[in-house]
Image: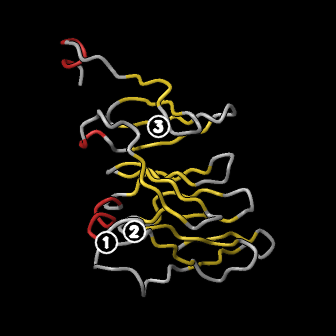
Amino acid sequence: ALHRFDPHLKRFQRFYLDTAPLKGNSPKKISSIAESHDGTLWLLISNYSGLGRFDKDSSTKIDLQPDTSAPPAVIDHFYDEALHLSSDNEGRLWLGTRNGLALFTPQTQQFKHINYDPNAPRSTLSVNHIRHEKDASTWLSTNNGLYQLNNNLQILQHFRAKKTLQNEQHQ
């Protein structure tokens, strides 16, 4: 559920997920929230293949936007563990999961899965955090280091921690 505090009434209002279209018995929790330019709240929901959408001004419930960009087995695995959601200057939503990166464009209602580093092992594609800069570049914190991407999703820089005997002793 999503909660909103009303300071005038000094109480919380609760908004529930529409669980009817949600599959499986896995618990559904909101992992991350991002606000788009129009004030819509977008919710990254663990164990749900897509996004939740909440209009702060008119909604009474959370609407679901499923990702249908690939076969269900692929999609379900991708959203296995949702980690971070962020909105960029163009209004696109960036979804970071344990299994990679996806972009959602609200205007077209399209999801696109991004292989930001085809040379990286699949086990290192986890996107833990996303940060957008004023120059339209985007930073990804991953299990394979930090990536800086340009607006066309090309790698500008990639920083990896060097493993040394000293580093390994302090871990």
Q: Nearer the viewer, residue 139 or 56?
A: 139
What is the distance, in whole Å, between disc 3 and disc 2 at their CAs?
21 Å
Q: Nearer the viewer, residue 114 or 89?
A: 114
Q: Secondary structure at mark 2?
A: loop
Identify the residue at image location x=65%, y=83%. Answer: 60
Q: Position of residue 17 (x, y in %)?
A: 50, 79
Residue 110 falls left or right of residue 88: left
Q: Quadrant of the C terminus?
A: top left
Label 1: how many Cα within 10 Å (few below 14, some 14–19, many 20+): few
Above or below, comparing residue 108 to residue 145 in the picture = below
Look at mark 2 in the image and give the residue it sits on: 49
Look at mark 1 in the image and give the residue it sits on: 72
Q: Position of residue 93 (x, y in %)?
A: 57, 55
Residue 64 falls left or right of residue 34: left
Identify the residue at image location x=31%, y=71%. Answer: 72
Between circles 2 and 1, the one closer to the viewer is: 1
